[in-house]
Structure formats: structure tokens, C-alpha cells
């Protein structure tokens, strides 16, 4: 049994981490590039789904409803063994519900490593103080930036502090385990009609 994992690039590192203990023949990962910060064409999504459907017996879509055509696209694959990971966005897929509720309740701006490093310029250009949309963050009454440091994905505090200084808001660092994503993936795998022994279990 082989399962394809189609994932948004923003969650690629986490998906690699939670599946690294599994046998090499259990999963194949298909990243969708660029990440959700940029326009992603429907054909890009479809190409990756096609690759997974051809090469694997089942496919799990780790991608949020931030793509407007995803639901419509899924209807075209309703005859295939495809499961959507629960959650409307990457935070609902990767954060424990209690932590997500706290951040939302406190109006905190959540960012993970890719947004603070790989796509730092794009985020700052979109929300930084010296840009056309420079006051979006401040005008949204964001109380602070929360840097989500997932277990096994390291980055230095200096990266976070420099980013926060550019945007002009305070920050904190939140250590996060990968347990919620593991639970979500295990539930998605369980949706397939497979003998228990054929389901790769996440450790």
C-alpha cells in the first residue's frame, strides 16, 4: 500500500518530519509550489494530484480552502481514492485546537519558519511598515506576532526579532509538537477502505 501526500509548500517540512519514521515505500510527497502566499493555478494543483493518483493507490490532500478552486477540483476526482486532511488552513491542520483558539482569541499573528525565512521578503512587502499595505497588521489590531517553532524545525530567535522589528509589533515564541498533524494524517489514512495491516501507522 502506497499513499501520496499532496501538501502546500508551507507545510512541507512538517509533513517530512512526521513521516520520516515510516518505510520509504509507504508514502510519496508531492509539494505544491509556490506556497499559499502566491497565486497558485488550478493546473498546478491538478498536475500534482494527477502524479499522485497515477503512482499511488490512495492520495491525501494536505491543502487548505485558501485555494478557491480546490473544492471544485476535488469533484473531478470523486471516483478516486482521495482523502482531504481535516482543516480549512495550515493552522487548523498543524496546531492543537486549544492553542489555535488562544491565538485567535488574542488576535495574534501566527507565522512558522517558512514565512519567516524563505518568504520573509514577500511577507514584509505585504505587511511591512514601509509598503503600500504597510498598516494592514497594525490596523487589524494584532496584539503580537507568534513564531510557531515546531518540534524538529529549528530557527534562531534573531530571525524572529528582526522580522518583528521590521513589522513594528512585539513577538513571542511558541514551541509546538507535531502530534496534531500526526493525528490528522492518521485519521485521513483511516478513511481509506484498507485492512488495518495495510495502513501505515504514524509513530
Image (cartoon, rainbow, N blue to C red):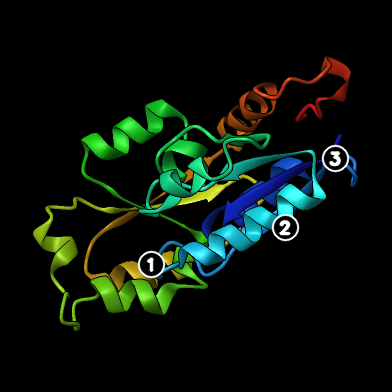
Quadrant in the picture for residue 199: top right
Asked if 42 appears above or below 73 in the picture, the reply is below
Q: Are marks 1 and 2 in contact (CB under 8 Å)?
A: no
Q: How many marks?
A: 3
> x and y percent of residue 127 in the render?
24, 71
Among the two numbered marks 1 and 2 on one chain, the one whose residue lies closer to the N terminus: 2
Mark 3 vs mark 2: give the one in front: 2
Mark 1 vs mark 2: give the one in front: 2
Among the two numbered marks 3 and 2 on one chain, the one whose residue lies closer to the N terminus: 3
Q: Residue 26 got which mark?
A: 3
Q: Residue at x 86, y 24 (%)?
A: 198
Q: Secondary structure beneath disc 1?
A: helix
Q: CA distance from mark 1 to mark 2?
A: 40 Å
Q: Is residue 33 left or right of residue 21?
A: left
> x and y percent of residue 203 in the render?
77, 29
Among the two numbered marks 1 and 3 on one chain, the one whose residue lies closer to the N terminus: 3
> x and y percent of residue 88 in the render?
40, 39
Quadrant in the picture for residue 60: top right
Q: CA distance from mark 3 to mark 2?
A: 16 Å
Q: Residue 51 got which mark?
A: 2
Q: Is residue 119 left or right of residue 28?
A: left
Judging by the rendered image, the residue that carries numbered circle 1 is 161
Q: Residue furthest left?
A: 139
| Residue 121 seen anywhere in this rendered image of the structure | yes
Q: Secondary structure beneath disc 3?
A: loop
Amino acid at each position: 500500500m502506497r499513499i501520496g501526500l499532496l501538501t502546500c509548500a508551507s507545510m512541507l517540512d512538517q509533513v517530512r518530519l512526521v513521516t520520516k519514521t515510516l518505510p520509504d515505500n509507504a508514502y510519496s510527497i508531492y509539494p505544491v509550489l509556490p506556497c499559499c502566499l502566491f497565486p497558485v493555478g488550478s493546473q498546478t494543483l491538478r498536475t500534482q494530484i494527477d502524479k499522485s493518483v497515477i503512482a499511488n493507490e490512495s492520495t491525501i490532500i494536505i491543502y487548505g480552502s485558501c485555494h478557491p478552486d480546490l473544492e471544485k477540483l476535488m469533484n473531478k476526482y470523486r471516483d478516486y481514492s482521495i482523502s482531504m486532511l481535516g482543516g480549512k488552513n495550515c493552522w487548523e491542520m498543524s496546531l492543537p485546537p486549544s492553542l489555535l483558539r488562544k491565538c485567535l482569541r488574542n488576535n495574534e499573528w501566527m507565522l512558522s519558519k517558512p514565512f519567516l525565512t524563505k518568504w520573509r521578503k514577500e511577507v514584509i512587502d505585504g505587511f511591512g511598515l514601509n509598503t503600500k499595505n504597510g498598516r494592514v497588521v497594525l490596523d487589524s489590531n494584532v496584539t503580537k506576532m507568534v513564531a510557531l517553532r515546531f518540534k524538529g524545525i529549528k530557527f534562531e530567535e534573531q530571525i524572529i526579532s528582526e522580522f518583528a522589528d521590521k513589522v513594528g509589533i512585539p513577538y513571542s515564541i511558541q514551541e509546538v509538537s507535531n502530534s496534531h498533524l500526526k493525528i490528522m494524517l492518521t485519521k485521513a489514512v483511516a478513511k481509506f477502505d484498507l485492512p488495518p495491516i495495510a495502513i501505515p501507522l504514524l509513530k
